[in-house]
Image: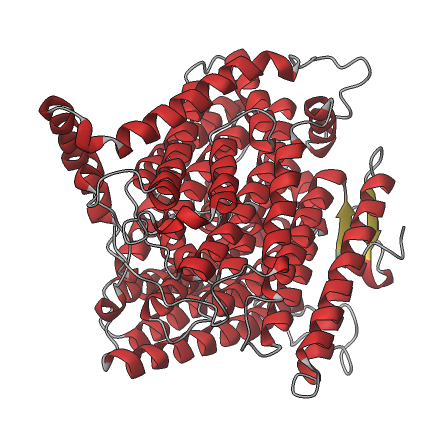
Amino acid sequence: MESLAALPVVLPLLAAALIATLAKLLPRRIADGITLAVCAAVIAIEVRLIIGTWHQPFVTWLGGWKPRGPIALGISLHLEPLGLCFALLTAILVFAALVFALRYFDTVENHFHVLLLIFLGALSCLCVTGDLFNLLVSFELAGAVAYALCGYKTEDTAALQGAINFAVSNTVGALLVLWGLGLLYGRTGALNLEQIGTSIASSPPDALIVVAFTLVSCGLLVKAAMAPFHFWLADAHAVAPSPVCAIFSGVMVTAPLLALARIHASVFSVPFFPHENALREILLGFGTATALLGAILCFAQRHFKRLLAFSTIAHVGLMVTGLGLFAPAALGGTAIYALGHGLIKGALFLLAGVMLHRLGNVDELELRGKGRGLPLLGLAIALGALAVAGGPLSGIFAGAAAIEEEAKGAGYGWLPHVFAFTGIVTGAAILRATGRIFLGLGPVSSGAGAGGGQTGEAPETFGSEDRTPVPMIVAPALLLLLGLGLGAVPGLGELAMDQASRFLGQGPAGPPPTHALEPLANAVPRSLLLVALTIALAGIDLAQGKLGTGGRGLLIRVEKLLIHPLRLLHTGHIGDYVAWQVAGVAAFAFLCLYLLR
Amino acid sequence: MSTHFAYGVAVWILLWGLYGIVTSRHLVHLVGCLAVVQSSTYVLLLAIGYRTGGVAPIFKDVPPATAAVDPVVQALMLTDVVVQATVMALLLALSLEVGKKTDTFSPDAIRRMRG
């Protein structure tokens, strides 16, 4: 296992270097083959590592450096199943994106493969590293590559907007993390996560530790697009090429949450333990606000990919609340949720790419009725919508069930309602778009749900529009099946809770588990109710023209009082976004300093 | 006293750089302000590693136990210089594309997507 430990990081980087060197000489198909082979190899290695570390995490030190006494010299790799499952998700999504891109990009040079491989290597490093600075550098590397991938279509001004806003926001976030890291290093002299944790565990936290925690958390939450740091995501994920969006929404916004969970568990959990309730309420508050904001704005979009981007923001908010509960069951549930959401959202973005390929547009109103000849595509997107809403048998359903049960046990009975609201509204938005595009339902103009986002997107493919190439069908189908099937794995909640409690350093939950989760079948009736409400909401929005004046008046008032002010906030101007970031960090810091000491 | 001054300078540069980004009207100026924010992290890291009276951390001519400044933060800083150079080059290339397409470098020119 020692020999396999660093391979998921090293293999993609070596392959990227090879393809970059030979870029002009390699024919496209050879580069495709090398990249797909490397992804498959990384998937196989990671499955082997997950099996090997299932009962006992594995720590290895790079370069032959070993810790001397309590002082860590060198960089450690800390392999354990939660992080490795995340790395596996990354590899699966990159594989699917590459399969999709086999026929999607006809004119791309081999740069695309190089960028994707570097991204895979950087995120794999992030999932396994035990060193704080190594974590930050992998984030920066993945980010730099992501900025380039986002602005890939330089002929489109909206793509430039997305890429520049993305790059500036995330770089400011990374610098905040670096400030926090510097403060922690100044206090403890250590960069190894375990060593920092041991150093600050003995005394109660003073202002420096609280400020360091604030800076590191806020920097990571900027990358995770929690409100009010979320503005860049709506711009960036709407304009990146569809296979790239699948990777962004699938893995790049949830990786910072994994990093935050690891940093909190290793470094800050002991000093902040007396104030855990306060920190929990702060995270629950921010997460709930993000979820509600993302859901409401998702419903108001007409640009299909921007709609999906806002639903990603909403679900990230829910995952932050799952993290904020600080319990093994909730952390396990969040992990399942992240995996399920990544697969389903990836599938939805790839399906949006197929839609763009066949219909030439992603604007819901302009495409009204044009999708009538593509029933299977509409059905697949509708299935994805119901899974996003929390329909039975998806990873999102299984994860949400675990988090909600923990929330009720901890006294936050309102949290399941937030999950329900977010699921219904985001699922209904996607379902409404499907109904309008593939069935021609709904009014010609959007009426009360006036759409946001740019109209018209330059088609990303220049191939024939009469057929969908086979790779572009296989990739989203594979992701959708995996995402839907994740909830069908028996005992998943218990497995995840076990691993999560090991992750949190509390030892395995032990057979028989000290805290048995309710069987998943108990949550199915509620999930079916959510599906019914989702379909109802989509139907109401599509049937606007048939509502009486009272109903329409209500919808118009909701739009004017609730949706319009929120849409005014999203100006597209990078200065506004960074101003919100500064305000958000200040608010978070004020709350932490006031409540955590 | 001098270390407190250095930390104060780092905070000042950070805040000033963020102010520049928020109020910038030219994309190249914005990238420059981002560089200013980055340099605040460099000042912070070097101030943390500095030892009054310490020598450079190269132990060729001096005995190993001599007080020296911390080389780890210098390594961190150099790594970050490289990463941020890449990001800034990318941002400047994107800004040039914006200038070519819209004949202006104002952030208002790239507000195509709103709401």
Q: How is the image coloured?
A: secondary structure
Residue at the spot x=52%, y=35% of the render? A383
Asked whether residue B66 appears in the rendered view, the answer is no
Q: Position of residue A156 (x, y in %)?
A: 35, 71
Q: Nearer the viewer, residue A230 or A437?
A: A437
Classify A285 as above or below A18.
Answer: above
Classify A75 as above or below B68.
Answer: above
Q: Position of residue A142 (x, y in %)?
A: 58, 62
| Quarter of the figure with residue A35 | bottom right
Q: Position of residue A570 (x, y in %)?
A: 26, 51
The reply, left or right, for residue A198 in relation to residue B19 is right
Q: Nearer the viewer, residue A504 or A456?
A: A456
| Quarter of the figure with residue A567 | top left
| Quarter of the figure with residue A286 | top left
Q: How many marks?
A: 0
Q: Position of residue A51 (x, y in %)?
A: 85, 40
Classify A278 as above or below A525.
Answer: below
The reply, left or right, for residue A144 in relation to residue A10 is left
Q: Nearer the viewer, residue A69 or A541?
A: A541
Classify A399 as above or below A472.
Answer: above
Asked whether residue A115 appears in the rendered view, the answer is yes
Residue at the spot x=66%, y=69% of the render? B71
Residue at the spot x=49%, y=59% of the render? A242
Q: Nearer the viewer, residue A342 or A449?
A: A449
